[in-house]
Amino acid sequence: MATVYIEASMSLDGFIAGPPNSGFEHLFAWCRNGDVPTSTANSTRVAYRTSAASAAHVRELNDITGTLVVGRRLFDTTNGWDGTHPMGVPTFVVTHTAPEDWKAEGTPFTFVTDGLAAAVELARWAAGDKAAGVGPGSVAWQALDAGLVDQVRIDLVPVLLGGGTLMFDRLGAAPVHLGDPRVVTGTAVTHLVYDVTGGRHA
């Protein structure tokens, strides 16, 4: 069955968004500060233009990802990515109530109303021999806190936001032990990949 990872661009002081819901021009500047293009699932659209090291890292992530789990807030903010998630994989949306007036075209979206753990389990089965990605946002730390995560992937950006939305917030299961990182040094970003050494609890 698929492994589960969480992933996000994070400031050096631990935030994935500044106050209030700001700072993205800093957190994602690395996505467009180089010369190597990386396309999305829609081959006509370039999502990244990075250093060669970051491009290889992004391509690896795209290659290993079979499904995604996201929260309803992100889904609504992006308007369901206009029907096609950039990674082009089946996406499970954790929500209290499924929207009645939204129709996906292209990438299938599944609205899961019985909790995050159920969404992660569905994503794991659907991913097959690939990985299921969770997040970003609160669903990521909640999945980690619930023991559902095998790997933590951080795009660490050299900026201090001073406040905002923490990547790891209210971890009741702390301390969570991680293995030694695999480190990829890009331009204005350090990509870190950690295995959760304790394994999955659920």
Image (cartoon, helix red, strand yellow):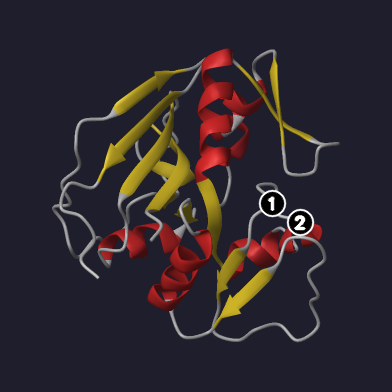
Look at 34% across and 44% down and name the residue there: 152
Question: For the point 47% across and 22% down, which residue is it?
Answer: 189
Identify the residue at image location x=73%, y=61%.
Answer: 107
- The answer to whether residue 23 is seen in the rendering is no
Query: Hey, what amino acid is under mark 1?
Result: Gly
In the displayed structure, 163 sits above or below 109; it is: above
Secondary structure under tag 1 reads loop
Residue 88, numbered circle: 1
Q: Which residue is mark 2?
A: 84
**Closer to the eye: label 1 or 2:** 1
Residue 119 coordinates in the image, percent (x, y): 47, 73
Amino acid marked by disc 2: Thr
* Secondary structure category for the residue under label 2: loop
Q: Give the spatial CA distance, label 1 vs label 2.
A: 6 Å
Q: Residue 109: tell me if it is visible.
A: yes
Q: How many marks?
A: 2
Check the image and report above or below for 181 versus 172. Answer: above
Q: Are marks 1 and 2 in contact (CB under 8 Å)?
A: yes
Label 2 environment density (alpha carbons within 10 Å; few <14, some 14–19, many ≥20) = many
